[in-house]
Image (cartoon, rainbow, N blue to C red):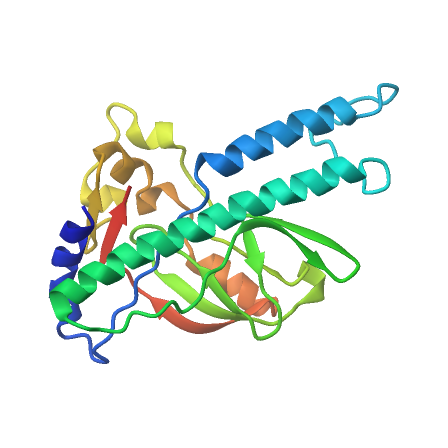
Amino acid sequence: MVEEVIDRATAYTWGVRSGQIAFMIHSGSRNVGKYIGGMWRDRACDAWPKTLKHPESRLFPLSVAANPELVKSYLQAEATAANYGFMNRLLLAELLRLRLRQVFGDVEAPLVYDVPHNITLAEGAGWVTRKGACPAHSGQPVIVPGSMGAPSYLLVGKGNDRFLRSASHGAGRARSRFDMSRKGADQTDSALGLTGVDCITWREERRIEEAPAAYKPIQPVIDVQVEAQIVGVVAKMKPVLTFKA
């Protein structure tokens, strides 16, 4: 399938004025992170003081003072999932790189930047947990992906303490997967927002469920973060080919 993606991408490389084309790989730890999250959610619930009412949010905070071993083991497990996601992206990038060289010869395809968007990091005297958000320290590269048909952005962080030196990961869903794939829904390219974008998928339902029409517009998300001095725009990247596993 990687060969098919690259072969179909070759047509787009010619005529790119700079002679370069950017590839963005978006993947995480798959079910590893989900499994770890569920396991420690249950462990945190079991550790909740029996005399206290459960929080309505069903989020059970762990205290370094009261639960030092649980906190330590969770952070280690989360780091394992994050490392798995990192290696997953590196492997996908290398497969892509190998095929590029088969088609174009000995071309350079360096890693520009890798950024997590679900992770807990030590910062200062404490920790910052980012869920659907990425670090945006002063001068730090920030990647905010659009949907399969919307532009993605390369940004630079401004280290805004008010927002915990963080930027959003994307725009978020506007319609559920069920709503997108329900019987009778308009699934033409124009209705899905895929006009002008070559989209390849292993399963047709993924193309429908993850189409641009399923997501909120990305531009207002970028605009509000620029206005709030969270990030600055470096480059806007319009997709021409998308592969969705």
Q: Position of residue 21 (x, y in %)?
A: 25, 69
Q: Is residue 240 above or below residue 199?
A: below
Residue 93 occupies which quadrant of the picture? bottom left
Picture quadrant of residue 101: bottom left
Image point (32%, 36%), residue name:
209
Q: Position of residue 147 (x, y in %)?
A: 35, 51
**Residue at 22% of width from left, 60% of height from top?**
98
**In the image, farthest residue toward the bottom:** 18
Residue 39, position as x, y percentages in the image = 61, 28
* Figure check: 40 above or below 7: above
Give coordinates of residue 88: x percent, y percent: 40, 49
**Residue furthest toward the right?**
51
> From the viewer's perspective, is 60 left or right of 227?
right
Vertical comparison of 215 with 159: above or below = above
The foreground one among 9 and 81 is 81
Q: Going 44% across and 46% down the picture, which residue do you hit?
A: 28
Is 63 displayed left or right of 100 in the figure? right
Is any part of residue 82 visible from this angle? yes
